[in-house]
Amino acid sequence: MHAHPSHYFIKYMLVSQDDIALDSVNSTLALHGMAPVEPLHLVEIRTEMGEPPEDFRPWDRSHKPTNRWLRKQKTHSLFHPDEATFEMREGILKNPTLRRKVEGLLLGNVSYREIAYRLQKDGLPVTDLAVAEYRHYFWNTEVMGLSDWAAYFELDKGEEGTGRTAATASVYNSALLAGPGLALYRMGVKKALDRQVVMLEIHEELYYTFMEIKSLPLSPQKVEMMGTTVRAIVRVDDQLRSSESALHDVLKKFERFKVLQDQATVPKLIDLAPTGSVSQKTRAEILMSREAHNE
């Protein structure tokens, strides 16, 4: 039995329709482009929810016991939607291109704000709150583990699945395993790369590859692999040294600039107003302040 990314949307269906059958739940999931939920997992979700309060009124905003229970179940915003909920429904669910990018970036653990920022720059307007709402109800990476995602993608390719993620499953898995950087790249979202950081990561990876090869038994293949890896390390090291040298030259140029201290002193009040001032200070008071200054 595996978790389902639409965990809280399934809860919403169980609350909004009394005694809804498994087939109806899965038909609604399919309409939203999601794979079916396993029977045992649906039973588990029902058990997790427990019983609603007496006089249960999920559509009544003013009924406090009901609203407290809905918030506990984390389904409140679907019964009482706000702007983010409407945007999630109309903007993300109904836009396949935007939806695919949002899902891939969420799998790569990219933050809501960065997802919204990157997609807006690519001409796909979406707010971070709508992304958060979509993640919560339909693509909940918090309730899913690696094995859950693997099972979900397989289930979606099966006879009962929608097949919506079949073409992107390998890309999604890459984003899931490699993190934000690769997720942004695989989703076609542009991001400037720091060349120095890239070279350092390659250098580190080559070093540990060398250590793995070193632990192998002696053989012609081991010698060949060690030689190839060492040559690659040397080339990357040369690139890093070249970059450091260029940075050093730039810093040397900045040494020509100096911050000069202003040698001028603040004028004394007696020099500015020898006969008195607009602040009603008399000459005697000004002279007293000068004496105090000189002391």
Image (cartoon, grey):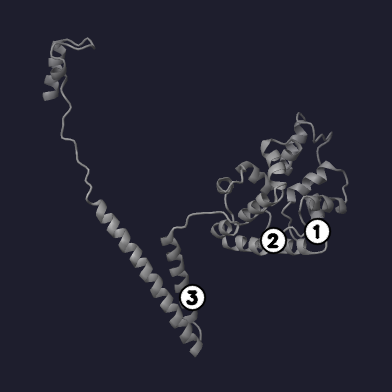
- Residue 54 in percent (x, y) is at 83, 35
| Residue sitting at x 78%, y 47% | 11
Q: Secondary structure at mark 3?
A: helix
| The one of 190 and 156 positioned closer to us in this rendering | 190
| Residue sitting at x 71%, y 42% | 90
Counting other residues with Cα less than 10 Å from the Cα at mark 3, is it few (<14), some (14-19), or many (20 or more)? some
Say whether residue 36 is left or right of residue 120.
Answer: right
Name which of mark 3 and mark 2 comes first in the sequence: 2
- Residue 148 in percent (x, y) is at 70, 61
Q: Amino acid at mark 2?
A: Trp
Q: Amino acid at mark 1?
A: Glu
Question: Mark 2 — residue?
Answer: 149
Name which of mark 2 and mark 1 comes first in the sequence: 1
Counting other residues with Cα less than 10 Å from the Cα at mark 1, is it few (<14), some (14-19), or many (20 or more)? some
Residue 255, label in figure: none
Label 2, label 1: how many angstroms apart (C-alpha)? Answer: 14 Å
Counting other residues with Cα less than 10 Å from the Cα at mark 2, is it few (<14), some (14-19), or many (20 or more)? many
Q: Amino acid at mark 3?
A: Thr
Nearer the observer: mark 3 or 1; the answer is 3
Say whether residue 82 is left or right of residue 292.
Answer: right
- Residue 169 in percent (x, y) is at 68, 62
Find residue 287 and report its image quarter: top left
Residue 209, label in figure: 3
| The one of 80 and 203 positioned closer to us in this rendering | 203
Q: Quarter of the image containing the C terminus? A: top left
Question: Mark 1 — residue?
Answer: 38
